[in-house]
Amino acid sequence: MYDNSTMETGKRTLSVLLVLVAFLAFWQLAVMLLRPPEYLLPSPVAVAKELGTAPEWYLSHAVRTIGATLLGFAAALGLGFIAAVGIVYSRILENTLYTLLVALNSIPKIALAPLFIIWMGTGLTSKVAVSFTIAVFAIVVDTVLGLRSIDPDALDLFKSVRATPLQILIRLRFPNSLPYLFAGMKVAISLALVGAIAGEFVASQAGLGYVILAAQGSFQTTRVFAAIVLLGVLGTILFFIVEVLEWVVCPWHVSHRERS
């Protein structure tokens, strides 16, 4: 089983690399044939050179964005799980908190970002708040679904031996919700990155969102592309970190057994 899973991981990595190389080759070929001005569409080579001119500078801004992303994601994961448990066990919270979350999720988060800037300032806290606001809904929805999607016979068995609600939560509902929770985490980690960038767009002096906004104002398109490429790489890495954690925590799930 280990050999099969290792082979599957190697195949997926190779396929991702092949797609990436093909995309970069197509991009470079299009630039060479069409010869657009660099301020409209720089080539991959120009973007790579831009990243190589000041790697420490780009890294410092990337660290700032990733810090806000991870803090927002962690807050969304912790508070979102607690909220999901409350919604499952309390009809009052289901009718109030769940409805409130749905209403807040329908509001474009970029519209809330200026309020967070006013309330919390232009520092890291406001970026974390925007990141949390965007990511928490996915955690709550998927976790509520997982906590409720249990076998009725298993629930009756636990009740027949007089298990307490806490024991049912820890031994039955929580293990059953893990695949759903990780599905929500995969979505939430990407949304958390989007939230951090949205906060940096509104008001910031650091981060990749600030780099994009400042470069756009001076028509430094190559720098904009360099920051976007970094965001794509970082977002992909964060997503696959969550996926690896899922493999480690719940290898018993049917989706992993089918792959193996």
Image (spheres, rainbow, N blue to C red):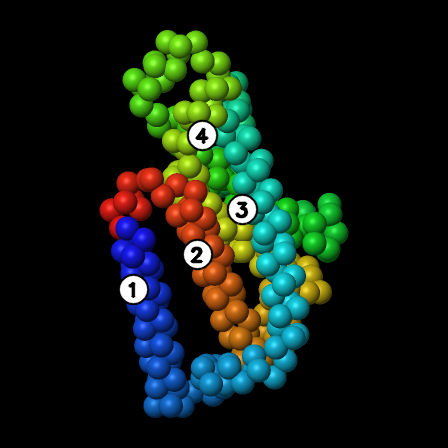
In-image side of 95 versus 150 (left or right): right
Which residue sits at x=75%, y=52%? 121
- Residue that mark 2 sits on: 240
- State the image quarter where residue 20 is shown: bottom left
In-image side of 219 versus 2 (left or right): right
Q: What residue type is labelled 4?
A: Phe
* Residue 127 seen from this side: yes
- Whether 48 is drawn above or below 130: the answer is below
Which residue sits at x=29%, y=64%? 11
Give the spatial CA distance, label 1 vs label 2: 15 Å
Q: Which amino acid does label 3 sit on?
A: Ile
Q: Where is residue 190 in the image (x, y as percent from the top left)?
A: 48, 53
Q: Which amino acid does label 2 sit on?
A: Phe
Give the spatial CA distance, label 4 vs label 2: 23 Å
Q: Do callouts 1 and 4 mark residues in contact (Cβ within 8 Å)?
A: no
- Residue that mark 3 sits on: 134
Q: Which of 206 and 158 is in front in this view?
A: 158
Secondary structure under the numbered disc 3 in the rendered image: helix
Which residue sits at x=60%, y=42%? 75
In-image side of 253 versus 234 (left or right): left
- Residue that mark 1 sits on: 11
First reached walking from the N terminus: tag 3 or tag 1: 1
- Residue that mark 4 sits on: 174
Neighbourhood count class around disc 4 (C-alpha, 10 Å): few under 14, some 14–19, many 20 upward = some
Give the spatial CA distance, label 4 vs label 3: 24 Å
Q: What residue type is labelled 1?
A: Lys
Q: Which of 205 and 17 is in front in this view?
A: 17
First reached walking from the N terminus: tag 4 or tag 2: 4
